Amino acid sequence: MYQFFVKEEQIGKDFITITGPDVNHMKNVLRMKPGEAVRISSDTGKSYQCSVLELTDTFIQLDILDSEIAGTELPNRIFLFQALPKGDRMEYIIQKAVELGVYEIIPVVMKYCVVKLDPKKAKAKVARWQAVAESAAKQSKRSRIPTVHPLMHFQEAAAYAMQCGCRLVPYENERGMQATAQALQTIQPGTSVSIMIGPEGGFSAEEIDALRNDMQIISLGKRILRTDTAAIAMMSLLMLHIEIEHSEAGYDTK
């Protein structure tokens, strides 16, 4: 079943109207026909099971069959603060983080980041990254599209992370997985979680010292992980813990 996202105003009492680029994609690329099933999620996180009713060149109308589909969102909002990596690794990180349930992704400029983007290139990159997030959200049947923020510098990102109840920093020089396990166990349903991932060159001494004051420095094992591996490993640990430990508590799907 294909997944699409709409604005709340596109949802009526019995029908949902698709407009914009998705019309061409559904009609001419996917060649959908009346009667085909479609999953629709709104920008508020509500999900619906629908059936294609009418296809035109400018809009597609869907019949709402069920508005009580179980949501696919985690009960915890995970904020991934990702230092800018080289090449196209950011797209890969975003794709996998969205599949694993991330809520927001914040690209961060740190001291040892190899990549340097001017404002014009940065704006274009963020637009591309948001498109990657939307595509991954459709593929993984998310109930909402995670937001990819404009680039933040380290100090701004550290301040933004303070909104989260649990703040984790995987660090290659930290030793001992027991602290990591204990940090995960403290996460309750509804607790927002920030993850601060360093660049290929690692955190600078000044950056890690600044983070120690308000965040939990943890280990991801004895091996040195690449920045993209660290992000995915951390997201996987969180997703697994939250799904197993808190599934019986009931999900907030919005």
Image (spheres, rainbow, N blue to C red):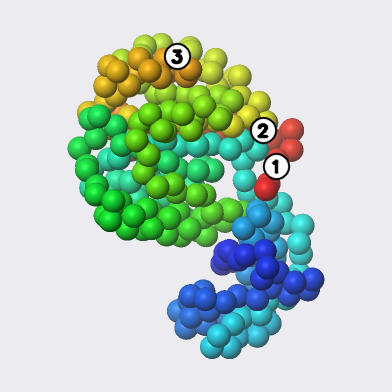
Tell me which numbered mark, 1 or 3, is placed earlier along the sequence.
3
Crowdedness near tag 1: few (<14), some (14–19) or many (≥20) residues, C-alpha within 10 Å: some
| Residue identified by numbered label 2 | 190
Name the residue type under label 1.
Answer: Asp
Can you tell which quarter of the image residue 63 is in? bottom right
The answer for how far apart the CA atoms under marks 3 and 2 are is 24 Å
Name the residue type under label 3.
Answer: Asn
Q: Is residue 9 above or below residue 123?
A: below
Side (left or right) of 43 relative to 201:
right
**Looking at the picture, how far across and down is residue 46, in whole percent?**
69, 56
Crowdedness near tag 3: few (<14), some (14–19) or many (≥20) residues, C-alpha within 10 Å: few
Q: Nearer the viewer, mark 3 or mark 2?
A: 3
- For image coordinates 52% across by 49% down, the residue present is 146
- For image coordinates 38% across by 58% down, the residue present is 127
Callout 2: SS: loop
Please name whichever residue, 115 or 139, is drawn nearer the observer in this view of the structure.
115
**Looking at the picture, how far across and down is residue 215, in whole percent?**
47, 19
Q: What numbered label is drawn on residue 252?
A: 1
The answer for how far apart the CA atoms under marks 1 and 3 are is 31 Å
- For image coordinates 41% across by 33% down, the residue present is 156
Tell me which numbered mark, 3 or 2, is placed earlier along the sequence.
2
Q: Is residue 50 visible?
A: no
| Residue identified by numbered label 3 | 213
**Looking at the picture, how far across and down is residue 154, in whole percent?**
35, 31
Residue that extends furthest to the bottom in the rendered view of this protein = 56
The answer for how far apart the CA atoms under marks 1 and 2 are is 8 Å
Quadrant for the N terminus, please: bottom right
Tell me which numbered mark, 1 or 2, is placed earlier along the sequence.
2
Q: Mark 2 and mark 1 in contact (Cβ < 8 Å)?
A: yes
Can you tell which quarter of the image residue 195 is in? top left
Name the residue type under label 2.
Answer: Gly
Q: Is residue 67 visible?
A: yes
